[in-house]
Each structure stands twice: as C-alpha cells, then as structure tokens.
Amino acid sequence: MLYETPRYRTSGERHLLVELGASVSLEANFRAIALSRALEASAGLGTEGIKAIIDTQPSFTTVLIEYDPKLLTQEGLKQLCSHHLSQLVQAEQIQLDSRLIEIPVAYNDRWCRACFEDYCKTIKPIEDNLELICRINGLDSIEALINYHSSIEWWVGTVGFIAGLPVLMPLDPSCQLRAPKYDPPRTWTPKGTVALGGGFTAVYPMVTPDGYQMLGRTPLRLFDPQSDQAPFEESPVLLSVGDRVKFVPISEARFEEIEREVTAGTYRYSISAAQSVSLDELQQQPLPLAA
C-alpha cells in the first residue's frame, strides 16, 4: 500500500528517510527509484562541485537522502521531495533506465553444500536448503526449482547492507517463491552465494554471515573497488538499483572456468545497454512454467 502523502523520518543531522508505503511492492520501489533519480538530478546549486543533496539510497519502500544542512534545510528538502513526487505519473507508467545482466549460477553446488554441512555439524541439523524451498513452494524436484528461479527476470530493488550486495524481487507478480531464514543465522556464507529469503533473492559479494537459504553460487565479482576494467570503470558495484537480472544455470566445471577468466580479466560480462522500461511493460512479460 502506498501512502497518500510520504512520511519523513529524521535520520541524524545529515540524513532524511522518506517512507512511501507500508508494504514492499514493485510499485513502491519504482516510485522510490524515480524520486531518488529526480533528487540527484536536482542536487546542484548552480556552482560546479557544490551539491545540497550528496547521495540518495532507494530501497523497496523508502529513500534515504544525505544532504548538506548548511545548504538545504530539512523543511526545504521535504518540499523538494513533495514537488518531485507530485510530478510522477502512476507507478505502472514511470519510465526508468534499466540494464539486463546475466548472472551465471552453479545451483546446488559443492561449496554451498559444504557450508550447509558445516552449519549442521557446528550449529544444529536442519533441512537441506533446496529441499526445504521445494517443499514450501510445492515444487516436486530441485530441477523444477532451478528452472523456476532461472526462468524469470529479477529486479534489483536495493543495493547495500554490505558493499555491492543486491536484493532482488521477481518482476512477474505471479512468482511466489518463498523461504524462511536460518534460525540462528550462519556464521559464514561463501562468496558469490545466490540465496532466497522471504520472497527475495540476494547475491553475496564476499564471505559474510547470513540467514537466507542457499541456492547456488556465481563466479562473477559483484564488488571490485580496485579494478578499472569493464564493467567496473565507473562504479565498483556490478549491479545497480533498477537493473534486471537473469540467472543462468551452469555446471561446477564452467563455474571454475569463468572464475579463472574473471581473475585474468578476460571474462565478458553479459550486460545490455540501458533502455527505458516501465513496470507496466515489464509485468506483461509471460512467466515460463516450472517443470
């Protein structure tokens, strides 16, 4: 549900949180991204290098804004947000520039299985990640789960928590893949793990504690602050808010080949040029049936 008027929360001396809705939805996220981009476009004060709005971070129902209180009051920022929101059309018709990026994944891989086995030995025995997801979602095999997860496009709704970590939701509203989190969480998760929690998919750019159910692992780098090679010339983060992702199943042998190519700098990332898309257009794409 979207609020009729946004709710504003003070988040320290230099930050304002704008809440657009009470529940997670693609509609709320589209409005959050559109507001974020409009604010960044209007951040300058006419003098090169001086910005009243320093940074924005859109999420599924919110936008966190970092601003310079010496140049812009909080009340002035609220008025600016209200102005931009009043200019937005219905969420379904908002046009956003979006790239389509393919992420190869070795599903049900030996590295995630080793992590799962370590958890069972050192924390407590639990049901296998993929078997649990299949049972909860009424899928009759792990192959059906892999086909379902990799047959749809996923939308990057936010990036954060740790550097370069994207959280994605399915573009097709009929996709109902869901999973509970570990309780308690794991103490570690392999770098590159693709995991499902609630209705979200996350991809982990580094070894980290976590509670999402592990699906597989990608050999791609998601965060590389030291590289000036494609695709990190302009940003150390591979996936940005508003990107679309297609997960592509690969074997463990192909995983290792790609990993070597990534290390050598010879791997060619599959990233389409940005194109203007609307939520209405994206949700008209048919969802392939899971086996």
Image (cartoon, rainbow, N blue to C red):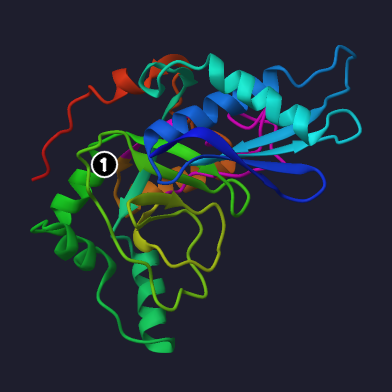
Q: What residue type is labelled 1?
A: Ser
Q: In this view, does 188 lie above or below 240?
A: below
Q: Is residue 275 visible?
A: yes
Q: Residues within 10 Å of mark 1 (few under 14, many from 20)?
A: many
Is 150 in front, or is 139? 139
Q: Residue at x 38, y 72 (%)?
A: 182
Q: In this view, does 16 lie above or below 215?
A: above
Q: Residue at x 35, y 23 (%)?
A: 279
Say which quadrant the N terminus sits in: top left
User: What's drawn in magenta, residue-wise?
Assistant: 218-247
Position of residue 113 measured from the top left corner of the image (x, y, whole percent): 34, 69
Q: In the displayed image of the protein, which residue is found farthest to the front? A: 4
Query: Does residue 226 show up magenta in the picture?
Result: yes
Q: In which quarter of the image is residue 94?
A: top left
Which residue matches tag 1? Answer: 150
Q: Is residue 279 above or below residue 4?
A: above
Query: Does residue 102 show up magenta in the picture?
Result: no
Q: Which residue is drawn at 29% across and 50% down?
A: 251
Answer with left or right where residue 192 lies relative to residue 139.
right
Answer with left or right where residue 116 lies relative to residue 220.
left
Position of residue 236 measured from the top left corner of the image (x, y, whole percent): 66, 38
